[in-house]
Structures are given as structure tokens and as C-alpha cells.
Amino acid sequence: MSGTQSRKSITKTESDEPKAATRTASPRIGVLAIQGDYDAHAQALREVGAEPVLVRKPEQLAEIDGLILPGGESTTFLKFLERDGFLSSLREFVQTKPTFGTCAGCILLATEVTHPPQKSLGVLNATVERNAYGRQIDSSIHTAATELPGGPLEMVYIRAPRIAKTGEGVNVLAQRDGFPVLVEQGHIMAATFHPELSADHRVHQRFVKMVRSHMGRSSR
Amino acid sequence: MADTHNGNGSFAPTSGTSLRLKVGLAEMLKGGVIMDVMNVEQARIAEEAGAVSVMALERVPAMIRAEGGVARMANPKLIKGIIDAVSIPVMAKARIGHFAEAQILQELGVDFIDESEVLTPADEAHHIDKHAFKTPFVCGARNLGEALRRIAEGAAMIRTKGEAGTGDVVHAVQHMRQIVREMKALTVLSEQELYAAAKEHQAPYELVRIVAQAGRLPVPNFSAGGIATPADAALMMQLGAEAIFVGSGIFMKERATPLDVEKNPKEREEAVSRAKAIVVATTHYNDPRILAEVSAQVTGTMKGLAAAAIEEKEMLQTRGW
């Protein structure tokens, strides 16, 4: 019965021209859903006109135009990635496709991780220190100026890491106490805070824009 | 309660800073497994297996049930040792109404406090005023009214109570089904019917209205109480749980005997296999092929105690209201 259902929905999409057109226009952006605040990211993506896809298996990477690595526990992410041969597929993906990491996701993207040291994708030219601001009791919300247009940005920090050092090619878009908190390097974006937990979606808009321009470039 | 909410039922970014940070951490734990641990070695195994958090306690519910006596907050030395041993968030339990234990846990830097029916209640009428703390709280519930009363007091996460320490999932299922059913029922009521619904649920009208509009709780809804196997975890996730607590299911051998993970490599391996399998099952709860695969990798399962065989007065879930 479920087979009939899915066939029906495929037929519907194919015959429904306006819908197909919208689909090409709105990028499909994966959110790594091993665990973490993937729901909050999916909701933010919907609100800025992208189509979220919860990614739990490596083969799903082929279906998406960009990827968000959400907040959560980076140690847990790594266990899964190591287990399913996921890590090598993901390494390949982040080499060429737009990827945005928040908090644990930022840790995963960095070239070097400290406190304690752990494996990473090594695509963001930066050193990231885990739990650098302390425990949950030290979590906080700040509003500060950024390079984004449109005034100060609210930033929600939860057991946040710190970008201790950035290398060549990294563009710093916002800082906290002199350390970068929002950065960009080519097709990679990273934040140590959680833009998905704020009503202001400028950071997600910027990422979706990056994904769109990338879609144009790769003859899709 | 002055907090507003957004369309997907979470407290909105316009809510108080403290509550947003508390619920924010709960969001980070979604899709994960929180494991009860009684020593540093168990905590390391949990982290190694991919747990998103550990609950530090002196005796797991199965032992409390078997041994009796007054169950209290764990010794701060034990909690500190576990905090130092792992990089993931650490939770600990305070007795219902025992705000002094909660103050101590906050001082220790615990990331989440479980005001838990598993410990012996300290107050038969009042739960802890959780708004008074900077550390977030999780509380157990058997039905929607109980969940909303805890949220009104400041809980940032709800979990089903189930019947802890049994390895029998039947009550966790009952509580999750009841909460989901009662939320669904609210969504079809008219505005003026919500006042009476609030009275029936013995919960604040404002919170009842939030649930009626969103069809879900304004804080993450996790499951606990009797979850012992990968299949149990998958069942609870499919029924609507957003993450899983496993208490006695990983480190217990017989009813009151834990696996010896410190000195017996074979028993350590057994605990690792259970922990890993439940973690994978919680993420891939909708994929029977993966569930079959990880279930096969488990060696041994907690023997357990059928919840139906427990007399009402021996039940932990009836503590708190």
C-alpha cells in the first residue's frame, strides 16, 4: 500500500508544472539529523524559502544542494559518521558543496579541535576550542554588530565553542570579545552561536543565497 | 505566564532569556540518548557509545527498587568526578520539592537537573520553583496536565515517567500515548472550550492555549521509564518522543546487580554493545533494517521486572502530581 502511495505522489509532482518550477527555485538543503537541533534549523530554512531535508544516511548527500551541520554533541556526531562510512562521503561533500555549521557543526568543520582534541572534517581554516565559555550555566544571549546588513544581530550561545584562531581565506563576519563567532570561507560558513534559535533569519538567508549562487555555477 | 510562543509550538524568541537558554539546551539533545551512570567508567562508556548526555546517580532505579531505603541526590564528589571525565552535558537528580539539593547541583555546574520521582520525594505538596534557577530542569509526567504544571513551574523539558527500574516499557508507552492523545484533543476545541479544558487538566489556561494552537508541548518531550532495548527506543520515538532516557537498561545484569564494567572485560563489552545499539536505534527509529541489524549486535539484556507485577504502592510514577 505504501508503494502505491509513493508512486501516486511522484506522478503528481511530475504532472504539476508550477510545483516543479517552485522546486527548482527553492534549494534543497540538508540538515544532518543524527541528533541535535535539526528541527529548529529545518524550521528556519522553511521560513527563508528553502526546502529542508533531514539527512541521516550518506546516500542522501547526493540529493541536496547544501548542508547544515546543526548544534548538538559533536562527539555523538563523530561516532555515527565513523560508524557508517559516512565520514568519507561527507568529507567529499564539504569539499565542493555549500555547508554551514553551527556550534557542534562549527567544531566538525574546523581544521583543528582542542579541549579535548578530536577528529574533524578539516575544511574551515580555524582552530576551535570546545566548551570554551563553560557549562550550561554560562550559556548566554548577546546582541552585537556584525558585517551583515541590517543592524545588530541576536546571538544565542549554548555551551558554546570558541574559534580561537583563523587562518588564510577566512572572512570574519562577527566577533565576541575579540574572537570570531561568525565566519565564511568560500562555500563554507560557520557560527559558534545558534542563529536557528533566533527570530532574525539573516544568517540563514545568507547561507541560502550562497547555496543558490552555487547551484547556478554548477550546471544544474 | 507572560511567555509568548511561535507557530511550531516552542517558546518564541521573545520569551525570557533564561527560559530560551534552558529550552535551547534541550533542543540540542533531541534525537539522542541520555544514559544513567553510577561511576566514571560507565560515563566514559556512555560518551564513547555516542550518548548526548549522562545522568549521574548513585544507584540506578532498578537498584533503588530492589534495595529500598531513602534515595537522595548523589554525592557531589561522584558528580564532580563524572563532570571532569566527559565532555558531554551532565545531568543529576534532585528529590521532588528538594530545592536545596537543586541549589547544590546548580553550584556543581550540572547542566540539567532532573526533579525525579525515582528519588524519595522531599515535599508531598510542592515541586521545586524551577524559574528560580539558572540551570534547566527536566520533570516526569504521566499526562498532559502534569506536564503543563511542571512547565508552569519552569521545567524546560518533559519526559514520560514510565515505570523506572523495571525494563518494562509498557507504562512509558501508556504515558506517551496519553500525552499525545490529550494534545491532539485540544487542537480541535474552540477558543471558549479551552477554559474548561484547562480546568479538567488542572493546568494554566495560557499553556493549554499554546498546546491547542501548536498541537505539541512548548518544550521538548522526551521519554523515560523502562526503556531497555533498541526496539523499545524506536517504539518510543515513533510514538512521538523526541529523545530517550535509558536508566537501568544498559548497565544492569540482574535486578539489583550492575555489570562489572571496571574489572570484567566481557561484561564491559556487553554494556558497550547495549549502549551503542540504543544510540543507533534512537537516530534510525524509522528504519527496521538498521534496527534489526543493531538489535542483533546486543549481547544480553537486563532481566527486568514486569510492571504488571508491581503493586500500586510500590510504583515510582505515582510520586508527584
Image (spheres, rainbow, N blue to C red):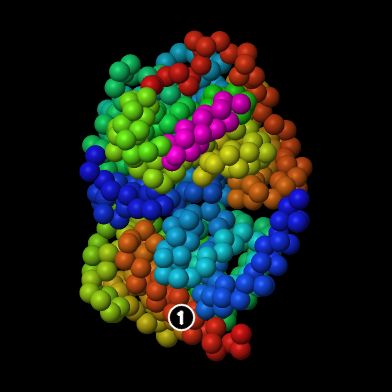
Q: Position of residue A33 (x, y in %)?
A: 55, 58
Q: Position of residue B25 (x, y in %)?
A: 39, 49
Residue type of the residue flagged with mark 1: Met
Is residue A15 at all visible to an observer of this figure?
yes
Res A141 quadrant in image: bottom left
Residue at x 33% of width, y 39% of height: B191
| Side (left or right) of A65 relative to B84 | right
| Side (left or right) of B192 relative to A21 | left
Q: Residues within 10 Å of mark 1 (few under 14, many from 20)?
A: some
Q: Which residues are magenta?
A: B170-188
- B319 over A127 or under it: above or below: above
Q: Position of residue A60 (x, y in %)?
A: 65, 66
Which of B287/B204 is in front? B204
Q: Chain of mark 1?
A: A
Is residue A187 at all visible to an observer of this figure?
no
Number of numbered tags placed on the structure image: 1
- B240 over A151 or under it: above or below: above
Q: Position of residue A125 (x, y in %)?
A: 46, 78
- A181 over A104 or under it: above or below: below
Residue at x 48% of width, y 61% of height: A42
In the image, is residue B157 part of the stretch drawn in magenta? no
| Side (left or right) of A143 relative to B242 | left
Which of B162/B301 is in front? B162
Q: Which residue is mark 1?
A: A210
Residue at x 60% of width, y 56% of height: A79
Res A215 quadrant in image: bottom right
Q: For the stretch drawn in magenta, what is the main secondary structure?
A: helix
Which of B212/A144 is in front? B212
Residue at x 45% of width, y 71% of height: A49
